[in-house]
Image (cartoon, helix red, strand yellow):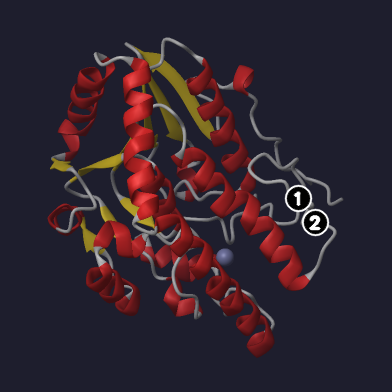
Amino acid sequence: MAEAAGIPAPLTPDQLGPDTSPVAYEVAAGVAYVTLNRPDYRNAQNSVMTYSLDAAFVKAVQDADVKVIVLRGNGQHFSAGHDIGTPERDFTVEYPNVASLYWDHTDRTGADQRLAREIEVYTGMCRRWREIPKPMIAQVHGACIAGGLMLAWICDFIVASDDAFFSDPVVRMGIPGVEFFAHAFVLGPRRAKEILYTGQRFTAAQAQDWGMVNHVVPRNELDGKVNEIAASIAEMPQLGLALTKKAVNICEDQMGLRNSIDSVFGWHHFAHSANVEANGDSLGGMDAHSMRDSAK
Ligand code: ZN
């Protein structure tokens, strides 16, 4: 088991508060605000953030007074994606699995290790969070890149500020998109191909036009718009909301979302392995600097 050298442990539900990092948590008027809080690293997601996020969602689900969950980011950006290069990158640290019943990745190697980790912290967590039985709104401003899209997409819908921008540039790594492959569902197949083939960012206005984002408002109106929608949802009965969420998610899965993600996940891991075969690096030579450029 690898040690978490200098990396703080994930937060537990009891530890979460309005100023905690890497995830902050507060409740007001029946709304739980879960805030990505690594602003110095553009809210890049390491495993500590992932497990702290999970703790925040557990807390919100268990609190009977919470009717709606808002997921947002502190600082200039929503999220620059998965952590592939900050000082607190914790790829080799073991944390007890929450999302999957699978073996610990840290004492495995190669493709076995990558698959074990990504089943847990990427597809596993995203599926777990998508099934949270309370409405979740993604409040997105600034960059929402690659793994950032995964977090926004597992929410029920997205409200964005007009300065928000989105991209999944991982085709530059030779990888056909991030692990939670909902692209063709949230963008439509042809838009999905264009944004993946080019790796180019798309704007909040485009995302709204394509059906990925529900509302776009000026940055200084973003909090107000999200709160207005959340307050309206909070007036509805909790069980009715939970069942409605389940109903729409079932329809989306019947349209093929779940099976598509499982199928594409295999190609995703073929790509990681092909990269290792070609140059010894599962990310195809991309580093945090080149990915960060996508978020500038
Ligand atoms: Zn991957």
Q: Residue at x 50, y 47 (%)?
A: 126
Q: Residue furthest bottom?
A: 278
Determine whether the beta carbon of the residue marked 2 sits less than 8 angstroms from the nearest atom of ligand 1: no
Amino acid carrying mark 2 in the image: Thr
Kindly identify the amino acid type of the residue bearing the numbered disc 1: Val
Question: How many discs mark residues in the rendered view?
Answer: 2
Q: Position of residue 118 (x, y in %)?
A: 62, 58
Is residue 76 shown to the viewer in this render?
Answer: no
Residue at x 38%, y 44% (from the top left corner): 250
The numbered dot on residue 106 is: 2
Instruction: Point out the residue furthest to the front here.
Output: 254
Name the residue rendered at 85%, 59% in the picture. 107
For label 2, the crowd category at 10 Å Cα-Cα, with few meaning under 14, some 14 to 19 and many 20 or more, is some
**Secondary structure found at label 2:** loop
Q: Position of residue 122 (x, y in %)?
A: 56, 53
Q: CA distance from mark 1 to mark 2?
A: 7 Å
* Cβ atoms at labels 1 and 2 below 8 Å apart: yes
Q: Residue at x 36, y 28 (%)?
A: 243
Q: Which residue is mark 1?
A: 93
Q: In the image, is residue 138 above or below residue 82?
A: above
Q: Badge 1: how crowded within 10 Å, few (<14), some, or many (20+)?
A: some
